[in-house]
Every structure is written in C-alpha cells, then in structure tokens.
Amino acid sequence: MERRSFIRLCGMGTAAAVTGGLFLPGCAGIPHIQVTAVDGVLRLDKSVFAIEGKDTFRRSVIVEVSGSKAPIVVFRTSDHEHTALQLLCTHKSAELNVAGDQLTCPAHGSAFSNTGAVLEGPASDPLKRFAITYAGDDLLIALS
Ligand code: FES
C-alpha cells in the first residue's frame, strides 16, 4: 500500500512523507501530524515518537485528520503500547489540551487520563478511544 501521509511538525508547515524517519531537531512542542485516512484507517510510523539524538521518546503526538471533528492524540506508553483518543471533551465538545499524560478542557475544567478515563468533571463519560493494531513499525488506527 502506498503511503499518502504527510507530516507537519511544530506548526512550521514543513511537510514530509512519514516513511520511517522524520525528525526535526530542537522541536520542543508536541508534534502535529497531518495524516490521510485510507479506508477508515490511519497509518502512523512509530518513528514519529523518536527524538533525534536521544534514547528517549515523545509521550504523544497529535494527529490531524481532514474531515474529522477533532484531532486525535496518540500516546506512547511503551514501544508496543499506544492509545489514540479524540481530543473532544465529552461534556460539551470543547477541544482538549494535552499536558504531559493528561488532557484538560479549557471550557469547564474536566481532566482525562492518557487512557481516556475521566479524572475530574464535570465530564462524566470517557473520551472516544480508537482501536490500534500494529503492522511492523506502523500503528494502524481504526477511525470507526
Ligand atoms: S466542555 Fe469540557 S468540561 Fe465542559
């Protein structure tokens, strides 16, 4: 399958194919990645979590999907464990902010864990979580 994914890091408008090695040194924020879904699936190379020149990894990346209600945050909890959550508050649909391993709502203060569980209300429902499977070094995120 041909990859049709493009990436934009740190809002700089830099685009490059996601093909196993994409890094921008000195990028301090959470990378924002634009990915095109193919047949309802997002393909994301694990290398987007790597930090060039370091043995550590980014905790998360934000995936922007055209036509989607809100971006998706993908957390890396280990080399083989990730969670993908819609960045949309379950209280009144405000877009969430990512801070470390938590998501916070700027509208009324709800907070969620990196698994989507409610940590603090007024939201009472967990975040929408997308199923992830793995294909080699790629994460396959099912949007349905
Ligand atoms: S919209 Fe998020 S707490 Fe109200």
Image (tube, rainbow, N blue to C red):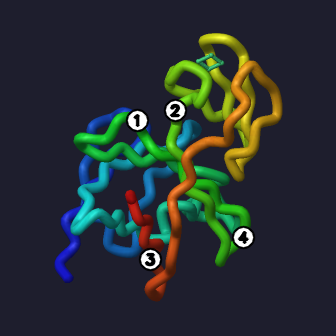
Q: CA distance from mark 3 to mark 2?
A: 25 Å
Up the image or down, 86 lies above or below 3; here it is above
Farthest residue, direction front: 124
- Apparent side of residue 40 relative to residue 91 in the rendered image (left or right): left
Residue 23 lies, in percent from the top left, at: 44, 58
Q: Which quarter of the figure is the N terminus placed in?
A: bottom left
Label 4 with label 3: CB-CB less than 8 Å: no
Quadrant containing ligand 1 reads top right
Question: Label 3 belongs to which residue?
Answer: 138
Question: Label 4 belongs to which residue?
Answer: 78
Q: Residue at x 32, y 73 (%)?
A: 19
Q: Which mark is residue 88?
A: 2
Q: Is mark 1 within 8 Å of ligand 1?
A: no
Q: Residue at x 56, y 61 (%)?
A: 49
Say whether disc 4 or disc 1 marks the residue closer to the N-terminus: 1
Point out the frontmost of discs 3 and 1: 1
Q: CA distance from mark 1 to mark 2?
A: 6 Å
Label 3 with label 2: CB-CB less than 8 Å: no
Q: Mark 2 packing: few (<14 Cα in 10 Å), some, or many (20+)?
A: many
